[in-house]
Image (cartoon, rainbow, N blue to C red):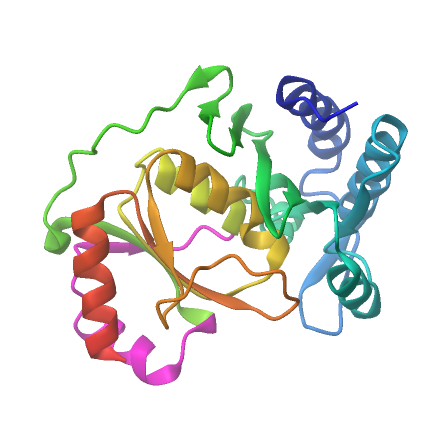
Amino acid sequence: MEPDLVFLRRLVREIARSELPPRFADVWGRTKLDGSTVTEADLVMQDRLQEALARHWPEIDFFSEEMTEDEHERLIAGEKGALWCLDPLDGTSNYACGLPFFSVSLALLMENRPQMAVVYDPVRDECFSALRGSGAWLNEVAMGTQSPLSPAMSRCIAVVDFKRLEGRLAAKLGANPPFGSQRNFGSSALEWCWLARQRFHLYLHGGQKLWDYAAGSLVLAETGGHSSTLDGEPVFAMAASARSVVATLDARLFEAWSGWLAQAG
C-alpha cells in the first residue's frame, strides 16, 4: 500500500497530540555530542512514529535525527528506494524551556528528493503538508501558488539564524541589514512552512541537516516559493552534512535577497 497523505497527516497529528503537550516545559533532557538537546519527548515520538510507519509501510526504511551518525551515513549511502525522514521534535530547546514554537517533521524521500511532507505544530494545531506536483495544504485547506503581495526588501521581516552563519556575513547583516526587522524562531521545519504561508518574507540559515529541510522545503516549493544554498545550489541533497538556506516565497524578493547576500559574502 502506498502512503496516503491524508492518513499520514492524521497519524502524525494523533501521536504528537498524545505525547507532546503533557511533557511540554516539564521534561528531562541531555546534551548530545553536537551540543544540541534531546529530551524524553524526542525519543518517545521517534519510537511511536517508527513503530506506526513500520506497521503500515514495512517496506520503507526509516531515518531520524535521533539515530547515530553511523546509522545516518549507512541509510543515506544505501538509499535506493523510499525512505522516511523524521525530526520527531524540531525545536527541542524551545520545547524544553517552555517556548511554544516546535514541530514534528516527516518527509517521504523517493528518487533522491522529497515526495510527501507533513509538518505539525501541536501548539496551534496547524498541520502543513505537501505532495510533489499536487500542492500544499494548511490543515485541509489548499495553500495555493498565487503571487504574494510582498513589500520592498527594506520593509521585509527576515528570519535569520545568526548562530550558524560565517562571521563576516553575520557582522554585515547585524551592522547594516537590508531588511526591516529580524526574527529567529528555533524550529527550522516550521520556519519553512511559515515562510510558505507568508508570515515573514526572507529566510537565511547557515546550516540545516536533512531532517530540518526535507519536509519544509517541499511545502515551500509546492506554494511556488524559491530556495537555494548560499552557493546557489539546490538546498535538498541526500547527504548527512549541513546545508545553508536562502529562501523567499516571492521570486522578485528571492533575486534581491540572494543578490545582496552574494555581494555581502
Judged left or right of residue 107, residue 206 is left
Residue 131, position as x, y percentages in the image: 53, 30
Residue 144 placement: quadrant: top left
Residue plotted at (41% across, 41% down)? 221
Task: Depth check: give the residue in front, 146 or 173.
Answer: 146
Judged left or right of residue 254, residue 83 is right
Q: In this view, does 99 lie above or below 147?
A: below
Task: Depth check: give the residue in front, 227 or 19.
Answer: 227
- Dividing the image into 4 quarters, which one contains the N terminus? top right
Residue 17 placement: quadrant: top right
Question: Residue 167: within the magenta?
Answer: yes
Judged left or right of residue 74, residue 255 is left
Furthest-bottom residue in this view: 168
Judged left or right of residue 21, residue 222 is left
Residue 200, position as x, y percentages in the image: 29, 43
Bounds of the magenta span?
Answer: 164-186
Residue 242 placement: quadrant: bottom right
Q: In this view, does 64 lie above or below 176?
A: above
Question: Residue 193: within the magenta?
Answer: no
Residue 86, position as x, y percentages in the image: 70, 45
Residue 79, position as x, y percentages in the image: 75, 56
Furthest-top residue in this view: 140
Residue plotted at (77% across, 31% down)? 19
